[in-house]
Image (cartoon, rainbow, N blue to C red):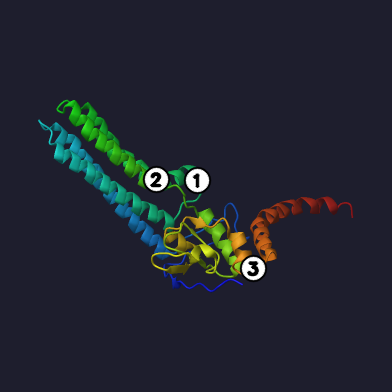
Amino acid sequence: MTETPKKKVVRVEQPQSSAPAQGSRTEDAGPAWTPSPEAKAKATKLRIISWVLWVLAIGVQAFAIFWVLKQVPVNMWLLIGAIVVTGVLSVIGSLCWKQSNRLDPASEKDRVKFFVQNQLGAIMSIVSFLPLIIMIFLNKNMSGKQKALAGGIGIVVLLIAGALGATYQSPSQEQYANETNIIEQLTGNDEVFWTKSGSVFHVCQTVPDVNKESKDGTIYVGTVAEAHGAGKDRLTQKWESEATKHCGYTQEQVDAVKAGLEQPAADTTQDTEAPAETPAEEPAQ
């Protein structure tokens, strides 16, 4: 028998999101998963903030290109300051954008939109820095050492901003719907568990991974959408073994969940074949 966790358990209260019931989805049935109006509004606000910050970053870059680099001699402290400010604005904008994608992810059906929406932070980092770096190395009012210093700082900041702006675990509507269906079919509730330091969420609060020592000594409880909103990338890949070894579910229950996830495709095939058989049998009778 598993031990009751000794860590504090805290329920996360965030706007609820919804996923279609398992078995009801079709290719043309609309979004696989939709956020609640509250989550959608928060995501929209974060995206507006991101664009404002990116526009400011591009504005600072333009100031550096069209004013600072035109001075003779070039004010190096002002130039380096402009590079740093551009980097800070770009990174904060990217972090806000990534959080908005957790609240309101794109669908994998449109591959171009899915890629752009998830990697826009990295794209905007390039837009905010690359022209300035090019103009630094082409500038005739700077010595070789000055170009090397300012250009080198610009490249480093660009790499940092790009790395922080890139999304390595791209969230999607399909992922959220699938994870929600797994948890609801297995437990009967859209409820998962995670810790602040972990990158994934779990089936129940008695699994060892959520009971390891942590600074805040807290296990967080919420929906799949709330777990993603808290910065968790996905449902643990060990959910099947967690369910049977630590959460009190049987292998038969886990197998039933896995079979349920595959059932809609089988049902669709049967529905399309049935009408073709009926006319063929009637003349024979």
Q: 198 or 41: nearer the eye?
A: 198
Look at label 1 and name its amino acid. Asp
Which of label 1 and label 2 is nearer to you?
2
Which residue carries the number 1 mark?
A: 110
Give the mark nearer the N terminus: 1 vs 3. Answer: 1
Position above or below: 250 against 278: below
Report whether residue 67 is seen.
no
Position above or below: 124 against 226: above
Position above or below: 228 against 14: above
Q: Which mark is residue 166?
A: 2
Distance between the alpha carbons at the discs numbered 1 and 2: 19 Å
Q: Residues within 10 Å of mark 1 (few under 14, many from 20)?
A: few
Which of label 2 and label 3 is nearer to you?
3
Report whether residue 95 is seen.
yes
Q: Which mark is residue 249?
A: 3
Q: Position of residue 84 (x, y in %)?
A: 23, 44
Do tag 2 and tag 3 residues touch (Cβ < 8 Å)?
A: no
**Quarter occupied by residue 71:** top left
Which of label 1 and label 3 is nearer to you?
3
Kind of element beneath mark 2: loop
Q: Residue at x 59, y 63 (%)?
A: 242
Look at label 2 and name its amino acid. Ala
